Amino acid sequence: MRLRRRDLLRITGATLAASALTACGGAEDEPAPTSSPSDCVSPTSDWHDAKNSGSGTLSMLSALLGTPELQDRYANNVLTGFFGSSNYQMATTYTTSDKLPDKIITALTGGTLADVVLPEYGWLHSMRRHNALEAVPDDLLTDLNVDERFLSGCRIEDTLYGVPYTMDLQVIGYRIDLLTKAGITEPPATLDALREMARELTGDGISGFDPFGPGLVRTWANLVGAYGGTLFTEDGTLSFNDGTGAAALNFLAELINDGTASLSDIPGTGKPRLITQGKAVMAPMGVGIWDELNREGLGDEAHTAFFPMPPDEAGGSPSVLKTGTVLSVARQSQYQDVAFQFLHHALEDQPLSTTAAMIPAIPSRTGLLVTSEIASNRIANAGLANIDHAGVMLGGSGAWLDLRPVIEGQLRLTLEGKQSAATAIGNLARVVSDSNNAG
């Protein structure tokens, strides 16, 4: 059985109601979600062999795979491997990360959330607040050895509401050859040293440090970690307003004032980054840029090495940003047991290794990395070598889906000189407070 992507239909989508601060929005083309009655139960009482009993069509909502080619490869290498021997099938809807929150909220409002949902790592607190997800069975991961260091972001009050799937760890890559040419033998050990080194290396059309390659919000969040903070505490309480959020934003503003960085260098979707064009010496990066580095002949040890975001002062802890995609099952699904059995299948050796290689990403079962197609991905290996410093993620609060659309706009206003860092952080903190009060 060859599974194909579902045709997308235009429906009216609801937008996120964050606040008047929202810098982006508007209705987008929406696929028609598959109906999943909320008052039904799974056809069996045990997920282990659920697909061998009953029949039906499950639905999946994902922003994981960005092209029709990858979506078809996933269908034929992962979905068919599970559904091909059963009387069930999977109807898939693919979208983009920016549109996924609207689609989730729209589906929840209509009671039509897909059976299997692949939100971004850090979104589960928001989805849990909407009562959207079913808790993961206690024994689902017993034989899988998913890395505990990724599981923490999926656990709410000691209960798993999703399983980490394909992950990313943001480190800083630097051009060894260009540092050597400048007489520099070691990467910077503190943020002040990073700023000074970047200033020294900037000139002749080259940026010493390009902070915006992976996106403004990602780099800001990683810097929050470098200043010793997190966006939210483990229980979802706002924490980036403790001074670390403003300090991280001011650091970016200083890079712009130094002439090291420019907002105009934020790459558009699919556009090459400065470091792969030979126009930057250092830049934050995740696993997905590896192929781009190699195409430009920069992936080998003679050209590029990696280090975590350095701390704000000597002796502090560096920072690695933890992101990725999660597998979860909708609470309203009528096929929960089959869906959970599919989650287990998706995390088995061959399906998970195949998916991670397609993206590329770090498999949540990190032990698979050494035997997978991305074993040679030096960014992935550098990230895992520093994973104990990965204390920051994008999300972790029930307010996240309301906050997410407005962060970049507020950060940019500061970097454009239109408001202070303290004002930006205060505005974002109010969005969190308003969201929490609204429930």
Image (cartoon, grey):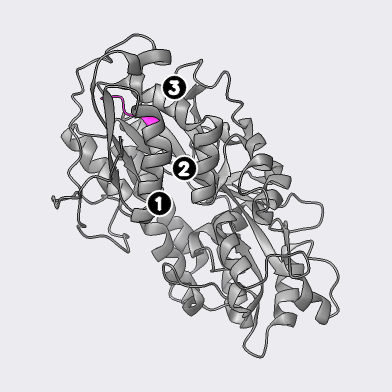
Q: Residue furthest top?
A: 45
Please tell me how crowded label 3 is: few (under 14), some (14-19), or many (20+) other residues with Cα within 10 Å: many
The nearer-to-camera label among 2 and 1 is 1
Percent x, y for residue 121?
48, 42
Q: Position of residue 141 (x, y in %)?
A: 54, 22
Q: Is residue 331 magenta?
A: yes
Describe residue 31's horizontal placement relative to residue 382 as left or right.
Answer: left
Q: In the rendered picture of this protein, how many numbered marks are placed on residues? A: 3
Camera-side mark, 1 or 3:
1
Range drawn in magenta: 328-332
- Quarter of the rendering containing residue 439: top left
**Pick the front one: 354 or 149:** 354
Residue 63 seen in render:
no
First in residue order: circle 2 vs circle 1: 1
Query: Does 106 sit above or below residue 28?
Result: above
Place residue 152 in its image quadrant: top right
What residue sits right under mark 3 in the picture?
Answer: 136
State the residue position of label 2. Answer: 325
Q: Position of residue 383 (x, y in %)?
A: 67, 50
Residue at left offset 37%, top offset 58%:
406
Mark identifier at residue 35: none
Which residue is pictured at 58% across the width and 25% down the height? 144
Q: Which residue in the structure is indicated by mark 1?
A: 70
Q: Are marks 2 and 1 in contact (CB under 8 Å)?
A: no
- Looking at the magenta stretch, what is its main secondary structure? loop
Q: Are marks 3 and 2 in contact (CB under 8 Å)?
A: no
**317 and 56: which one is in front?**
56
